[in-house]
Amino acid sequence: MTRRLSLAKRVALVGATASCLAACTTPTHLGTSAPHSTLVFKGLPHTELPRDEVLDSKSTGQYEFKATSAQGATMYGILPMRVNGKTMTLSILFFAPALALGGFRDPYALYEFDPDKNQVRYKNKAGDNWVTFEPTEEQSHRAMASFQDLAAVQPLPPSKPSATPAAPAAK
């Protein structure tokens, strides 16, 4: 009986360790082929590219984005992500709820946005070839709608006092 309990503890420990390791995140490099482009993910700050950012794994949901070039071309889309088979397998074997908690879809390590061409290129390692992705019309509309919904919910900044006095109200 003691031996079985010991084995059960070991299996639980391996499952918990695998889940914790699977939840670790690494920075994703976000670059551009169009200098002075900006990128914003829904709910994250709008900043200039290139930059490194930690993007969490997801089991559900997407990273909706809006990329804008210096020339004013705007691109909306959903960030392509990869399925992490190791995380999925370990979660199924040792702790299935970890799929929902930690996620099994990870961002790629390198992205390059080109709003002028409406393309995102991505790869997992520096030596890999780029894979080119063009958001579908449906993905673009979905991302655009999510940003419009976000703008509708966020309060407007306080207005500055006018330099000219307001006209008196008519009685």
Image (cartoon, rainbow, N blue to C red):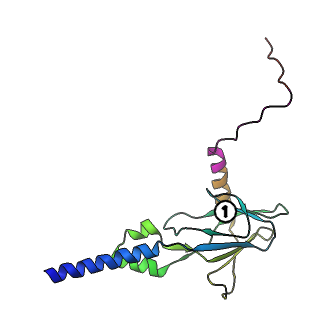
- Asked if residue 141 lies left or right of residue 89, the reply is right
Residue at the spot x=81%, y=71% of the render? 34
According to the image, label 1 marks what residue? 65
Q: Which residue ends up furthest to the bottom in the rendered image?
A: 127
Occupied quadrant, residue 12: bottom left
Q: Residues within 10 Å of mark 1 (few under 14, many from 20)?
A: many
**Quadrant of image for the N terminus:** bottom left
Front residue of this view, candidates 136 and 167: 167
Q: Is residue 169 above or below residue 5?
A: above
- Tell me the amino acid under the disc marked 1: Phe
Residue 9 in the image, given as x and y percentages of width and height: 25, 77
Q: Start and end of the magenta stretch?
A: 149-164
Q: Is residue 138 visible?
A: no
Outermost residue toward the top in this view: 171
Q: Is residue 67 left or right of residue 85?
A: right
Residue at 45% over, 68% down: 102
Tell me: 142 left or right of 58.
right
Residue at the left extreme? 1
Residue in the foreground of this view, choosing between 113 and 50: 50
Q: Position of residue 61 (x, y in %)?
A: 53, 63
What number of labels is visible? Answer: 1
Residue 159 on the magenta span = yes
Element marked by disc 1:
strand
Q: Residue at x 21, y 80 (%)?
A: 6
Whole-percent x, y for residue 42 in the image? 63, 58
The verdict on residue 97 being magenta is: no
Residue 168 in the image: above or below residue 112 = above
Q: Is residue 118 visible?
A: yes
